Image (cartoon, helix red, strand yellow):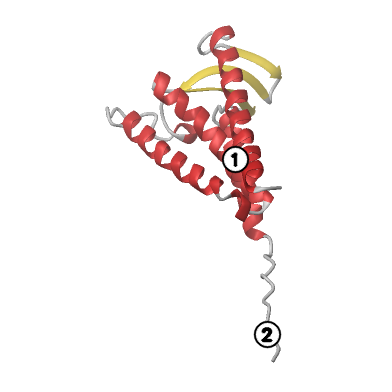
Amino acid sequence: MNDSRSRAVMYGLAGAVFAIDRLTKWIIETRVDAFDTHVVIPGFFDIVHSQNSGAAFGLFADSSSEWRTVLLIGFSVVALVALTVMLWRTPRLDRMTATALALILGGALGNVFDRVRLGTVTDFLLFYIGQYQWPAFNAADSAIVIGSGLLFLDFLKPKRQAARTQDVS
């Protein structure tokens, strides 16, 4: 695959993640009342409508600082720029790394879009067992976690060393 085509595929994947995230959040925002719960699998999985004013998994959500949202947006924009630059180098990356970066970029775009638009991020997937529950999350968070997992797996993979050509004289 040539350079521009591989970049287009990876940026397209990031765009698809962003579109899926926006669509699913729009459905929740327009069809599920705030703090409403729709049981999907009793005792395990619900669809909810919550707004996360903090970072991932509700970190800093209890902060009353007026700088919280500004700092979260600022750090996110820096991360988006870094991911965009890394993804531009797609031709030099293996497929797993490029796919991972594209998933993370698309997910980060989705959450930054929410934070800029609303000051919060819409979450709606809630998994739990008994009184133990994972914090509610969304499609963007899922893409970020999957992308991070792929990067981790890629990091664990033994790398092939580039073959060196030696001059025989």
Residue 125 seen: no
Task: Name the quadrant containing residue 37.
Answer: top right
Q: Residue 161, relative to residue 70: is it above or below?
A: below
Q: Position of residue 69 (x, y in %)?
A: 35, 29
Do the numbered discs 1 and 2 sit on residues whose CB atoms are within 8 Å? no
Q: Considering the image in quadrants, where does the C terminus appear?
A: bottom right
Amino acid type indicated by mark 2: Asp
Residue at x 68%, y 26% (from the top left corner): 44
Residue lying at the far front of the rendered structure: 169
Residue 126 vs residue 102, the one in the foreground: 102
**Dot 2: few (<14), some (14–19), or many (≥20) neighbours within 10 Å?**
few
Q: Position of residue 95 (x, y in %)?
A: 68, 49
Nearer to us: label 1 or label 2: 2
Q: How much space separates mark 1 and mark 2, taking CA atoms?
A: 40 Å
Query: Disc number at residue 167?
Result: 2
Q: Residue at x 27, y 27 (%)?
A: 66
Residue 15 against residue 102 in the figure, above or below:
above
Q: How many marks?
A: 2
| As drawn, 84 above or below 33 | below
Q: Which residue is mark 1?
A: 102
User: x%, y% of residue 102?
Assistant: 59, 40
